[in-house]
Image (tube, rainbow, N blue to C red):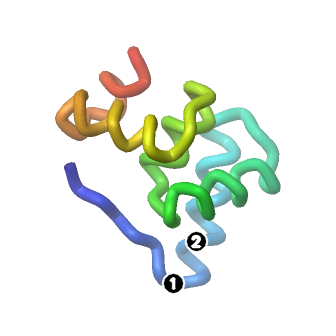
Amino acid sequence: MIDVMLTNEKLRGRAKRILAEASGRDLSTAEHAMRQSGHNLRVALVMLRLGVNAAEAREKLTNAKGNLRRALGE
């Protein structure tokens, strides 16, 4: 699995907006998930879409061999 860590503030803002749109959540919730995931967009999306914590989201991504759709059960 490829972990993308967002270190640039501009990229973090963009990722937060994308996450909010993709998850159907508000920006505040998306920002909280990003912090909890260590600023990992894929982990944060799994967290919000499936209602799991960061460790569970990472495990789901690992079990899905990094395939986001599979981790989300799509």
Q: Is residue 6 above or below residue 68?
A: below
Q: How many marks?
A: 2
Q: Residue furthest top?
A: 74
Residue under circle 2? 12
What amino acid type is highlighted by mark number 2? Arg
Q: Which residue occupies 52% across, 56% down?
A: 37
Q: Quadrant of residue 70?
A: top left
Q: Quadrant of residue 13?
A: bottom right
The spot of residue 68 in percent (x, y) is 34, 34
Q: Residue furthest bottom?
A: 8
The spot of residue 72 in percent (x, y) is 43, 24
Spatial CA span between label 1 and label 2: 6 Å
Q: Which residue occupies 54% across, 74% down?
A: 11
SS type, badge 1: loop
Q: Residue furthest front?
A: 55
Left or right of 50 in this view: 24: right
Residue 8 tag number: 1
